[in-house]
Image (cartoon, grey):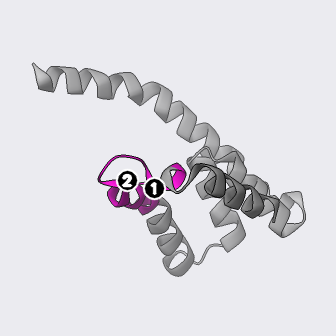
Amino acid sequence: MRTLVSFVISTTIFGSSLWAGTEPPAPWNTFVTLCAPLIATIVGYWFMKMNPVLLLSGIAGGRSCTPGLNALREAGGNDVTSLGYPVTYAIANVLLTVWGPVVVAFVDAWRH
């Protein structure tokens, strides 16, 4: 509940630009950001029949989203809801660190 209250207060103070972006194609920014978690939720829940709480904590870890984990822990009332978070968090951070320079090198080579 505290997470929702924080979101409402932040949106009230700063406006919808916090979550919708400030550039002209703002709806596309939101759409692209939400694609991976939505697809992971659909595939994990309906096709792989995963536990929704563990699935959501894994998605939060993959997105390195600690507020999402805190919301799950608050809603669940215990720490069991955080079981899916650490592994996906570690994998996401390692991949980001390793592949960041590779992507920059490819983009630089593509531009020249």
The structure residue drawn at horizontal position 74% and vertical position 55%, both measured from the top left corner, is 6
Using residue 18 as the reference point, say whether residue 10 is left or right of it.
right
Q: CA distance from mark 2 to mark 1?
A: 7 Å
Amino acid at the residue labelled 2: Asn
Tell me which residue sits at (73%, 63%) in the image: 4
Q: Disc 1 marks which amino acid? A: Ala
| Residue under numbered circle 2 | 29
Q: Is residue 46 above or below residue 79?
A: below
Figure check: 41 above or below 10:
below
Query: Which residue occupies the extreme left position in the image?
Result: 112
User: Which residue is labeled 1 in the image?
Assistant: 20
Q: Secondary structure at mark 2?
A: helix
User: Residue 112 placed where, x, y %?
Assistant: 9, 18
Residue 50 seen in the current view: yes
Q: Residue at x 43, y 49 (%)?
A: 21
Category of crowding for the residue at label 2, using alpha-carbon neighbours closer than 10 angstroms: few (below 14), some (14–19), many (at least 20): some
Q: Position of residue 90 (x, y in %)?
A: 62, 38
Q: Is residue 84 visible?
A: no
Q: Residue at the location (61% across, 43% down)? A: 64
Q: Magenta span covers which residues?
A: 18-36
Of 13 and 3, the residue lying toward us:
13
Residue 81 within the magenta-colored segment of the rendering: no
Answer whether labels 2 and 1 touch (C-beta < 8 Å): yes
